[in-house]
Image (tube, helix red, strand yellow):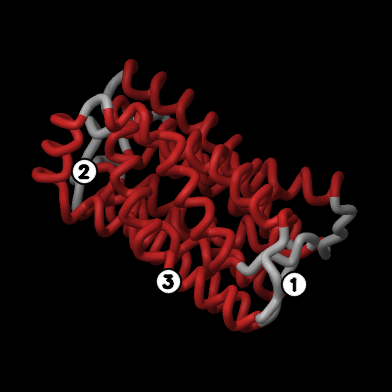
Amino acid sequence: MHPAAIALVLAAAVAHAGWNLFAKRVPGGGALFVWLTAVCSAAIQLPFAVGAVLLTGEPVEAVWFLAAVVSGVIHTAYFVILQRGYAVGDLSVVYPLARGTGPMLSVAAAIWLFHERPAGLALAGAAAVVLGVWIIGGLGSSGEGSWAGGVGYGILCGTTIATYTLWDAHAVTVFAVSPLILMGGTSIFEAALLAPYALARRADVARIWRENRLAVLAVAVLSPLAYVLVLFALRLAPVSLVAPARELSIVLGSIGAWLLLREPNPARRLAGAVIVVAGVAAIAAA
């Protein structure tokens, strides 16, 4: 993989693990928390998106709107499902399963749909990443009910991750949409989709903002930052390599869940993390 792509993916992993730790701390926020983060994120990203349009000097294409609308729908589903998962399960269950299912489906679809042919070492690394992620997820840590809920939402999240990874990769490569423009537009449509629901519950929105302002702003900044870095990486390396490599965030998220959230079973989760690191190293060497 291109060295710049590796650096981008590593930076994205740090940002991604960070915003998920913040999101987990607001398990009862649901769609209203997602709407607040989308509004703040859109406001933060708008100047960058406009700047990207002005710098390119190219006319705005209709396909850019299509890319942002579809991406906005998929990302909204992802964030809402993720928050629901965090309300019923541990981060160290939901997060690894979501991140593990996503690249597994992404690699398979990239090979099938885009006819990518990654090297054998890269495929072995991708398989190691997926295996490590599932070991980290284990059998849950908060009881039977939490495991059942965590698994269901984790797999649903993984499906949406694979879907938006493939769509957004298509948007920035085939449609040639700037990652800054795509992410800014996506956040705007996320906010628009959830606006009717949020505006009908203004009191709850005000409470969530008052009690969780730091978490809202952290997710609003770190979530698009992590994904923009990935989108730029996709311009330097194929999706079948970038999608699994970004799962290094699983290691950071699992360590954070242990140290900051006090979730148990650190030995098993760190063992899985070592396998993930080995997989990422194999992907980088391919």
Which residue in the structure is indicated by mark 3? 47
Q: Residue at x 36, y 29 (%)?
A: 196
Label 3 neighbourhood size at 10 Å, few (<14), some (14-19), many (20+)?
some
Dot 1: what SS?
Answer: loop
- Give residue 286's mark: 1
Instruction: Give how far apart the Cα atoms at labels 3 and 1 are.
Output: 37 Å
Name the residue type under label 2: Arg
Q: Residue at x 32, y 49 (%)?
A: 37
- Give residue 25's mark: 2
- Above or below residue 273? Residue 76 is above
Instruction: Give how far apart the Cα atoms at labels 2 and 1 are.
Output: 37 Å
- Above or below residue 152? Residue 91 is below
Q: Position of residue 39 (x, y in %)?
A: 34, 50
Dot 3: what SS?
Answer: helix
Name the residue type under label 3: Pro
Q: Quadrant of residue 80?
A: top left
- Above or below residue 42? Residue 96 is above
Instruction: Please identify the residue farthest to the front as the structure is shown.
Output: 59
Judge left or right: residue 201 versus residue 105.
Answer: left
Label 1 neighbourhood size at 10 Å, few (<14), some (14-19), many (20+)?
some
Of labels 2 and 1, the one closer to you: 2
Contact between marks 3 and 1 (CB within 8 A): the answer is: no
Could you tell me which quadrant the C terminus lies in?
Answer: bottom right
Residue 77 visible at all: yes
Name the residue type under label 1: Ala
Q: Position of residue 25 (x, y in %)?
A: 21, 43
Q: Position of residue 167 (x, y in %)?
A: 69, 48
Q: Position of residue 63 (x, y in %)?
A: 73, 54
